[in-house]
Image: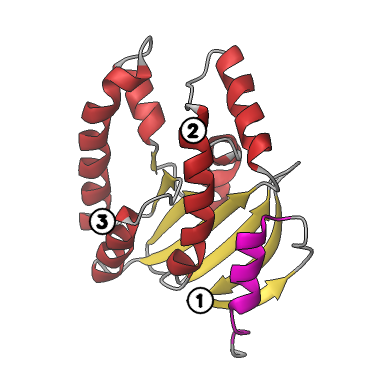
């Protein structure tokens, strides 16, 4: 089996890190996990934002190291930008497969409340305007990323994360109940053709 890049994706506050810490080793078969927020926290525990630039450099170096070694690893991202399209391309060039585990909640207010709860528990903050912007952009970018991934899964993360759709390279192989997900995501899933058998 080819080594694999696992993108643990979705807007801020949808439960990506919680899922990764609990399940990603079993899902991916690898403990290698790149999480910019966790790296920044390690560099500057009392002011995570102050460690972000240095953390970005470390994350980029680790990604390159894992790809060069052709070692399976997971990378957490909001998918709010298009930077990781190049990461997917580089993974494919390195002979790796790419899987996206995309976490979505029904409303941005759920994400904002979860971020507030995380802050109350000593975790890092995300300004509300940033959370709202990333929520919309992440959803808008999902289909583009899914079209480049060898495999993708969408999780309804309003409660315990549950897989509600799966596919590959921009086609859909399985779809469960998705009506409660944001309209942008439902529309993206509606627009995908069914995957060919085999």
Decide: few, some or many residues near mark 3? Use Cα within 10 Å; few <14, some 14-19, many ≥20. many
- 177 or 93, which lies in front? 177
* Quadrant in which the C terminus is drawn: bottom right
Discs 1, 2 touching: Cβ within 8 Å: no
- Which element is circle 2 on? helix
Q: Residue drawn 66% across and 28% down?
A: 113
The residue closer to the viewer here, 31 or 53, is 53
What is the number of callouts on the image? 3
Cα gap from disc 1 to disc 2, whole angstroms:
30 Å
Q: Is residue 29 visible?
A: no
Residue 94 versus residue 106 in the image, above or below: below
- For the record, the magenta segment spans 181-195
**Which x, y percent locates residue 108?**
63, 41
Magenta-colored stretch includes residue 93 = no
Spatial CA distance of label 3 from label 1 is 23 Å
Labels 3 and 1 touching (C-beta < 8 A): no
Q: Residue at x 53, y 50 (%)?
A: 136
Drawn side of residue 121 relative to residue 141, left or right: right
Disc 2 versus disc 3: distance between alpha carbons? 34 Å
Question: What residue would you read off at disc 1?
Answer: 170
The image position of residue 190, as x and y in percent, is: 66, 75
| Among the 4 quarters of the image, the one containing residue 192 | bottom right
Numbered label attached to residue 67: 3
Quadrant placement of the N terminus: bottom left
């Amino acid at each position: 089996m080819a080594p694999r890049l696992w993108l643990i994706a979705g807007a801020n506050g949808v439960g990506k890190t919680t899922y990764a810490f609990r399940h990603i080793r079993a899902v991916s078969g690898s403990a290698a996990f790149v999480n910019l927020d966790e790296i920044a926290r390690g560099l500057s525990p009392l002011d995570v934002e102050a460690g972000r630039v240095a953390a970005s450099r470390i994350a980029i170096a680790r990604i390159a190291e894992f790809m060069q070694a052709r070692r399976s690893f997971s990378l957490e991202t909001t998918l709010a930008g298009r930077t990781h399209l190049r990461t997917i391309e580089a993974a494919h060039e390195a002979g790796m497969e790419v899987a996206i585990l995309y976490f979505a909640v029904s409303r941005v207010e759920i994400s904002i409340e979860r971020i507030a709860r995380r802050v109350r528990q000593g975790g890092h903050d995300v300004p509300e305007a940033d959370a709202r912007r990333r929520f919309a952009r992440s959803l808008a970018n999902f289909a583009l990323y899914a079209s480049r991934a060898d495999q993708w899964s969408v999780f309804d993360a309003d409660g315990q994360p549950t897989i509600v759709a799966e596919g590959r390279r921009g086609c859909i192989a399985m779809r469960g109940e998705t009506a409660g997900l944001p309209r942008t995501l439902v529309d993206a899933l509606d627009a995908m053709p069914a995957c060919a058998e085999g």
